[in-house]
Image (cartoon, rainbow, N blue to C red):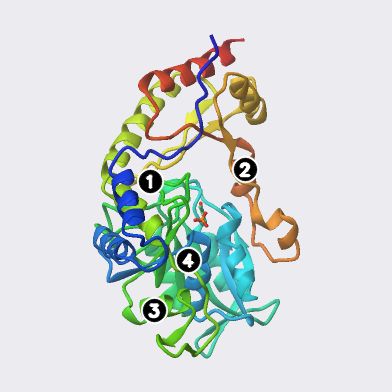
Amino acid sequence: MSEKFIPLSVPNLKGKELQYVTNAVETEWVSSGGPYVNEFEEKIAKYVECKGAVACQNGTAGLHIALHVCGVTKEDEVIVPTLTFIAAVNPVKYIGAEPIFMDCDDSLCMDSDKLLEFCEKECSFINGKLINNKTKKHIKAILVVHVFGNAVNMEKIIRIADTFNLKVIEDATEALGTYYTKGKYRGKYAGTIGDVGVYSFNGNKIITTGGGGMIVSCDAELLKKAKHLTTQAKIDDVYYIHDEIGYNYRMTNLQAALGIAQLEQLEDFIRIKTENYRLYKRQIESIEGLELLDFNTNIRPNYWFYSLIIDEYKYGLNRDEVLVKLNDKKIQTRPIWGLIHQQKPYLDNPNYKIEKAYYYKNKILNIPCSTNLSISDIKKITNVLKDLKEQ
Ligand SMILES: *Cc1c(COP(=O)(O)O)cnc(C)c1O
């Protein structure tokens, strides 16, 4: 009997997706006109309790626009994490600005203590501008990533941003549904605390539109500007008058139809992901040399991705060996990303005291986390992990 393939992270489309998409097709509203796009924006804004939302083609496009509306130009620098997906950083280069790479802490998110140290020791604050001592360039913004549905320490980030007059962009592409349960931002959703936040609805994210993104902000002006830029910067609908270089980034009605159906299930998905995480955790606890990375305790995470940390000396196999052995058993896993400051397009960009990112880069394996995983799938995976240890 051939073994069942267990994928890493796949969509779950068992709600009203077909009904809404069929409606979009039957009414022949398939492009960026059509009622679902506005409705999806309103529903996301309501869900994350934000002033408004602007739908776009994908998270990458959303981040590009987020940098634009924060006033980042080609003269500027932007502080970014090195441990992330490259789509968080590329938009900085689309603008022509330059990224400066920061380390992560044990939550895998940007280390805010090192960030503060960098701002204090390596920069000067002159006339309300943070200037990088080495390059003499203006650092205009911090772009943080809520990694795997965990949450950045936004209290510290915002304090630093206020001190040095920096804009804050939240890449919450992986963290829709995560909110703080303690502290200053208790009750606030990841993505809604900085100047602009961005969600992604790529196929592997917690909800999907095939491909899609959403820009959120509590600043009505920024939202207006974002809508303008994502829709070709047109100021007159009849005569085609444009006042700047815009983009064709608007989401389509077909995508939004999927998105609304997915959003209806988001809390169920989070509940399932939480239960699956706990089951994995119980099973993995007893295996020496393996650990499932915790989420922060001051949040309600969306539990999007699960990170297995492998201690190769205690476990007997290293991360890449485990990947191959699980693959042989038709269990799909992925190592965490390659660090961005080590990627070819970024070799000349500055980085600051990167340490932990190297450690986690070599130790983490992401294991299957789809909402349609069964209990027996999880037990199969953890039993394979137990067996590998004993061999
Ligand atoms: C998925 C993702 C993006 C990009 O989103 P797309 O919708 O795929 O363009 C950006 N940053 C991070 C951290 C992501 O995981």
Seen in the picture, residue 265 relative to 91 is either above or below; the reply is: above
The residue under label 1 is which amino acid type? Asn
Which quadrant of the figure has residue 29?
A: bottom left
**Can you say which quadrant of the picture contains the C terminus?**
top right
Mark 4 lies within 8 Å of ligand 1 (Cβ measured): yes
Disc 1 to disc 4, how far (Cα)? 26 Å
- Which mark, residue 62? 4
Q: Secondary structure at mark 3?
A: helix
Disc 4 to disc 2, how far (Cα)? 26 Å
The answer to the question of whether label 1 and label 4 lie on touching residues, with beta carbons closer than 8 A, is: no
**Coordinates of residue 28 in the picture (x, y in percent):** 36, 60
* Residue mark closest to the camera, 2 vs 3: 3
Name which of mark 3 and mark 1 comes first in the sequence: 3
Q: Which residue is mark 1?
A: 296
Q: Which residue is mark 2?
A: 361
Q: Which residue is mark 3?
A: 222
